[in-house]
């Protein structure tokens, strides 16, 4: 058994997301729309939207983005990624957008997401919200809104579990190296 | 030149012989056959222990491609393939280039065959000039030059009246007419048997009736002209039944079937296998069974290979575009022995269909070990395991559907005119 | 998840799982064609050779658009290999194509089986874009997608395929695929155009199209080729249209929610009346749109396929 460590409980996750929501309001971005990156960015975006609605009484629109069509590693992955539906139910042109993902790591997923978003139109700005920033960036990408920043070893895995995908809400740090996807 | 073949089991259906005999030949003629194992001095001894000694095989239907298509086969490679397969006499069809439709081509083939010397190669003259199906070829001249039969094999004779005249005219010169029975308006562009497989592969089919309608026409013309008709490569149940009925009525009709029509069905064409594309096409299991039955009840006179060499290139252009035909002389014996091992026919029957049967059908001298017959002898081991390896063929071509088959039966010696022309 | 096959040669080779993956991917890629920038970079740098040895503007264009939407370089080749039997063998063709280092070969050929034989000779995936009278697997997949989108299921549907079954690769692929997915498939048309041995696929045959129309959930009309008239498969287009064409009169007996498919191009007024082809039941244009999505899905799924 690989060793694993609990990084965040559900309550801690909620607290972190609430704090992100407050910071978004503070930055004057209450009009921004949210775009969750598939798979776990999507429920997180909805979670953030609920917290924002608690404060502003207005639920921001949430889009879903599958970045598999923008990957740069198709020839290296062992198995062909499944293409999921991308659903952006609003005009990207001139919108302020907050991209939401679970873990910020190399930055390549965000690079792909930015490319994808730009194909939908010309946003006014794009910010990034992540639940966990674990370091090891390979591209010059930063998140404005971060729930938890931790130092990790390269062969560790940060696993964000979400009710919608995994049946419960918590964040784990796993020691053993499993395949990056 | 004196030869004695000892210790073998001699099977000669022409004299109803099956047993341990010693066969003696002098100057190319069988001089005697008897139980006495003592060989007088002066004889070269060939020990056939454990093997079958049979009259040399006769193949009534081959395409040797010379002149004109020497890249596929020529008389040398064809003769080598023949003797490697145990055949000492073969008939070669006229669809060469130029067509064997006049005495000069016939003479040239006979001259070349004599130079090569391995097997007896007997030309079949064309029925019509240039195989065009319009005017009779110079049948008389070709017969004088050595043609033993006439046929437009390769190009079906669509014109009924021409076929009638061919039978009548050939009658005056005493040679049988061989028919490749196919109604071109019915086979029309088809490339394999019309049925399940052609539909699944999406390729145009050739219906049985394309063959059967013409078999019936030619049988009726044989009846009208009272002349010898030989039906080549019968492939269908109904077709063979027509021949059976003709024979019952004592019409002068004979026929041959091929090893591939006996052993393979249209399923051999699956995966677009061009080596199984042949005309007439491979049919169904039911047709194979009917043909085997016809071997046993005497409807079939001969098994002939329709050895039709084609180059690799000509078979590599898709099932629709590639040429019809497959080669058979070097695979015939082991393939046919499978029928014997499966107890579908007897060994004696098989030998009859390769020796006496074809000799009688075409009125040839060989096919027998009777005293005074040509010393054409095939010695083979019916149980020796073999794997068909096209790379080891003597033929110039490799177009066989039997590649890699594991079979039993190997030719050990082929003797033609008293000389050993092949030994394994 | 990947396909169980490396080539798309016959729908026979596809498992139900493969079909589900292809259709799911196609449906999730549909959205790309609705964007203002109709292009994603996933197949950037991939070369897709469109080898249409038999002319077909529609299918070729569909593949070309599909390739371009995924940023692949689609290159049209029609001069090599079109002359099999004129001295060029399949092996020559395969070597010539291979020398261009394609990532996928899309092959259309008038001779059945050529994509199969090419697939054995080249190193990259091959998609059969229609071979002779054999198969047209991408057409059957797009038809499946079109039916599924409207009817939400395939199993249990009654699908009537009407017309020239004998010469139709679309018919053969659809029969096999729809049966595999659990549909009931009936064939109707003149007996001269129903091939021998088709019953091996377990499909009832009707010579009167009015016998199948009332119970059909889907009517798939096949294109009738004018040259068949000269070849005596039927006496005249006029008579064909009268007995085997779909028109207002025959449609009176159809189910209210029947849908009509046609692989195109339509011979208006021959196998199908213009008002039916353009009418409320017709999904002919949806087929074209879905065709691009299905072909995008296949190009994507085959490009990543490891040997
Ligand atoms: Zn023939
Ligand atoms: Zn022949």
Image (spheres, rainbow, N blue to C red):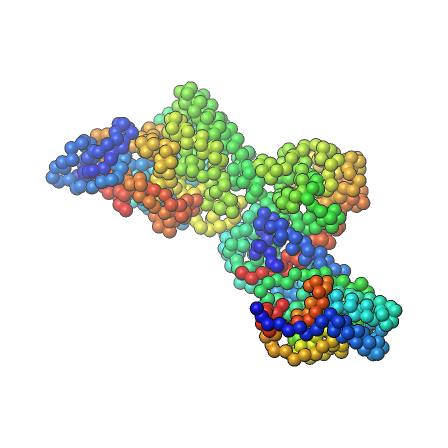
Looking at the rendered image, the quarter that the N terminus of chain A falls into is bottom right
Tell me where residue A57 sits by quadrant.
bottom right
Tell me where residue C52 sits by quadrant.
bottom right
**Percent x, y for residue A44?**
75, 68
**Location of residue C168 with respect to B214 vertically, above or below:** below
Q: Most extreme residue toward the left, as rendered?
A: B41
Q: Most extreme residue toward the right, as rendered?
A: A57
Residue at the (41%, 23%) spot, across then down: B247
Residue at the (56%, 64%) spot, across then down: C101
**Location of residue C83 with respect to A25 vertically, above or below:** above
Return the residue nearer the eye: B291 or C144. Answer: C144
Q: Most extreme residue toward the top, as rendered?
A: B249
Res. B83 in view: no
Looking at the rendered image, the quarter that the C terminus of chain A falls into is bottom right
Return the residue nearer the eye: A138 or B168. Answer: A138
**Percent x, y for residue B398?**
41, 48
Res. B349 in view: yes
């Amino acid at each position: 058994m690989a060793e694993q460590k609990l990084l965040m409980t559900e309550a801690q996750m909620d607290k972190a997301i609430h704090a992100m929501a407050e910071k978004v309001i503070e930055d004057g971005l209450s009009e921004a729309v949210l775009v969750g990156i598939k798979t776990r960015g999507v429920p997180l975006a909805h979670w953030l939207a609920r917290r924002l609605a608690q404060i502003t009484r207005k639920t921001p629109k949430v889009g879903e983005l599958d970045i598999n069509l923008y990957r740069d590693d198709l020839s290296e992955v062992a198995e062909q990624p499944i293409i999921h539906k991308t659903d952006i139910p609003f005009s990207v042109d001139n919108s302020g957008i907050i991209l939401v993902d679970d873990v910020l790591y190399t930055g390549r997923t965000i690079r792909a997401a930015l490319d994808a978003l730009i194909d939908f139109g010309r946003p006014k700005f794009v910010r990034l919200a992540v639940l966990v920033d674990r370091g090891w960036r390979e591209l010059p990408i930063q998140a404005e809104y971060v729930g938890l920043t931790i130092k990790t070893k390269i062969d560790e895995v940060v696993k964000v579990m979400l009710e919608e995908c995994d049946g419960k809400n918590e964040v784990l740090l796993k020691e053993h190296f499993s395949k990056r996807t | 030149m004196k030869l004695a073949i000892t210790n073998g089991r001699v099977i000669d259906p022409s004299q109803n012989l099956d047993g341990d005999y010693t066969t003696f030949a002098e100057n190319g003629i069988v001089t005697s056959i008897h139980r006495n194992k003592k060989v007088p001095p002066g004889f070269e001894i060939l020990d056939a222990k454990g093997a079958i000694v049979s009259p040399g095989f006769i193949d009534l239907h081959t395409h040797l491609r010379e002149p004109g298509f020497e890249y596929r086969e020529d008389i040398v490679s064809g003769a080598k393939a023949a003797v490697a397969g145990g055949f000492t006499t073969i008939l070669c069809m006229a669809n060469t280039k130029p067509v064997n439709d006049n005495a000069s081509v016939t003479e040239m083939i006979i001259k070349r065959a004599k130079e090569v010397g391995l097997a007896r190669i007997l030309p079949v003259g064309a029925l019509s000039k240039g195989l065009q199906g319009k005017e009779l070829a110079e049948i008389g001249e070709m017969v004088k030059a050595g043609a033993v039969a006439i046929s437009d094999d390769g190009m079906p004779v669509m014109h009924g009246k021409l076929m009638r005249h061919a039978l009548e005219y050939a009658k005056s010169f005493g040679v049988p007419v061989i028919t490749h029975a196919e109604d071109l308006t019915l086979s029309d562009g088809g490339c394999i048997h019309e049925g399940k497989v052609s539909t699944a592969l999406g390729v145009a089919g050739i219906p049985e009736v394309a063959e059967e309608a013409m078999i019936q026409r030619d049988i009726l013309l044989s009846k009208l002209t009272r002349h010898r008709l030989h039906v080549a490569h019968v492939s269908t149940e109904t077709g063979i039944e027509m021949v059976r009925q003709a024979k019952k009525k004592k019409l002068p009709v004979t026929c041959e079937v091929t090893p591939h029509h006996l052993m393979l069905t249209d399923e051999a064409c699956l995966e677009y296998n061009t080596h199984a594309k042949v005309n007439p096409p491979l049919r169904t299991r039911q047709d194979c069974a009917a043909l085997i039955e016809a071997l046993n009840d005497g409807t079939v006179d001969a098994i002939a290979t329709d050895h039709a060499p084609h180059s690799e290139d000509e078979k590599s252009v898709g099932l629709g575009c590639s040429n019809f035909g497959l080669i058979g002389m070097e695979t015939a014996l082991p393939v046919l022995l499978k029928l014997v091992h499966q107890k579908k026919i007897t060994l004696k029957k098989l030998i009859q269909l390769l020796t006496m049967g074809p000799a009688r059908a075409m009125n040839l001298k060989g096919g027998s070990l009777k005293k005074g017959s040509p010393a054409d002898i095939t010695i083979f081991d019916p149980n020796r395991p073999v794997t068909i390896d096209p790379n080891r063929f003597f033929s110039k071509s490799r177009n066989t559907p039997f590649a890699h088959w594991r079979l039993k039966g190997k030719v050990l010696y082929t003797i033609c005119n008293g000389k050993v022309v092949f030994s394994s | 998840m990947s396909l169980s096959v490396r080539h798309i040669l016959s729908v026979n080779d596809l498992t139900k799982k493969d079909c589900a993956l292809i259709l799911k991917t196609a449906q999730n890629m549909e959205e790309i064609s609705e964007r203002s920038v109709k292009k994603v970079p996933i197949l950037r740098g991939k070369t897709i050779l469109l080898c249409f040895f038999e002319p077909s503007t529609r299918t070729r264009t569909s593949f070309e658009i599909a390739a371009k939407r995924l940023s692949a370089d689609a290159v049209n080749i029609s001069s090599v290999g079109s002359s099999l039997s004129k001295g060029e063998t399949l092996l020559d063709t395969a070597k010539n194509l291979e020398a261009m280092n394609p990532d996928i070969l899309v092959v259309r050929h008038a001779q059945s089986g050529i994509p199969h034989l090419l697939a054995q000779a080249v190193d990259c995936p091959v998609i059969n874009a229609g071979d002779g009278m054999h198969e047209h697997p991408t057409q059957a997949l797009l038809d499946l997608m079109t039916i599924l989108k409207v009817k939400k299921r395939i199993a249990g549907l009654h699908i009537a395929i009407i017309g020239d079954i004998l010469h139709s690769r679309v018919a053969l692929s659809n029969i096999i695929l729809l049966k595999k997915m659990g549909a009931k498939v009936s064939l109707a048309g003149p007996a001269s155009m129903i091939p021998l041995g088709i019953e091996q696929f377990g499909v009832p045959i009707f010579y009167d199209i009015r016998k199948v129309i009332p119970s059909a959930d889907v009517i798939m009309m096949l294109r009738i080729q004018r040259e068949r008239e000269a070849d005596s498969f039927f006496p005249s287009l006029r008579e064909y249209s009268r007995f085997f064409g779909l028109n207002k009169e025959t449609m009176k007996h159809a189910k209210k929610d029947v849908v009509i498919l046609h692989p195109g191009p339509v011979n208006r007024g021959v196998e199908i009346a213009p008002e039916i082809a353009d009418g409320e039941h017709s999904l002919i244009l949806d087929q074209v749109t879905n065709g691009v999505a299905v072909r995008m899905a296949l190009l994507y799924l085959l490009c990543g396929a490891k040997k």
